[in-house]
Amino acid sequence: MSPRPQYSAVEVAARRGIILESALDQIAKRGPEAVRMRDIAEAAGFSVGTVQYYFGSREDLLVRAFSAHTSSVVEAIAGLTQEQGTAWERLQSSLRAVPMIGDLQRRSQVWIELVAASSRNDYLAESVEAVFDTWSAHFRALIEIGIDDGSFLPHADVDLIVDTLIAAIDGFDLAAATGRSSTTSDRIAASLELTAGSLLGVADIAAGHAADIAAGKAEARFRSV
């Protein structure tokens, strides 16, 4: 038997990355229960032996693939925060970026499979919880900034608003996973902005500002008479 080629740490990481991405593609296509090592190896362009060398068992590979997917989503969420603008502008920017994280349909399909599998695997359950916690912390921080600076006038408890936004995102993930044609990035962003704006009283504040301006103009006209 020929000795296995020696690869640098960078090359090994790249090969492992290709295998993990191929595993995620197969999970999205077939579902985790139906994915075979051979399917992943063929998609990655490696032998089954090579895949086993890097990840051992099929179960370990699938868990690592799910974990890698979770990490990429968490990193993407963390990168949504923009430092400039009002709290509402920053929240809008985040909501518009939601459907732009990775390939929407593939990401949604993998997320649904991950949530389902997490009920049978404690490690995956922790990964799912990490995504929910990161979303929650991201939205809560922006909302609290907006409350403090007067940008938001919430119509509900902050935690309830955060849960509602996350539930809306999950709902769109379900639609995207099934390939529903109306689930476009623009439509998702517009719906999320509408939901957030309504719950945070953005329109109420704008109306209040408009009323203040109108009152100020009326007072100015009265004084000029």
Image (spheres, helix red, strand yellow):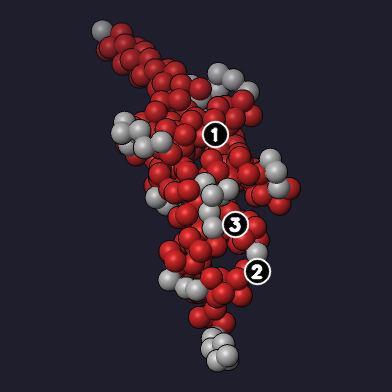
* Contact check, label 3 and label 2, Cβ < 8 Å: no
Q: Residue furthest front?
A: 1
Residue annotated with mark 1 = 166
Cα gap from disc 1 to disc 3, whole angstroms: 25 Å
Quadrant in the picture for residue 93: top left
- Residue designated by label 3: 62
Mark 2 highlights which residue?
56
Q: Nearer the viewer, residue 136 or 23?
A: 23
Secondary structure category for the residue under label 1: helix
Q: Quadrant where the N terminus lies?
A: bottom right
Q: CA distance from mark 1 to mark 2?
A: 35 Å
Closest to the camera, between mark 1 and mark 3, is 3
Which residue does the image show at 26% across and 7% down from the upper left?
A: 225
Which amino acid type is marked by label 3?
A: Leu
Residue at image x 57%, y 87%? 4
Task: Judge whether 23 appears above or below 52 on screen.
Answer: above
Q: Residues within 10 Å of mark 2 (few under 14, many from 20)?
A: few
Q: Position of residue 37 (x, y in %)?
A: 55, 62
State whether residue 221 is above or below residue 156: above
Point out residue 135 in the picture as x, y percentages from the top left corner: 57, 42
Residue 4 sits above or below residue 192 on the image: below
In terms of secondary structure, where does tag 3 sit? helix
Q: Nearer the viewer, residue 181 or 134?
A: 181
Give the percent coordinates (x, y) of residue 131.
60, 46
Q: Nearer the viewer, mark 1 or mark 2?
A: 2
Task: Determine which quarter of the picture holds residue 57.
Answer: bottom right
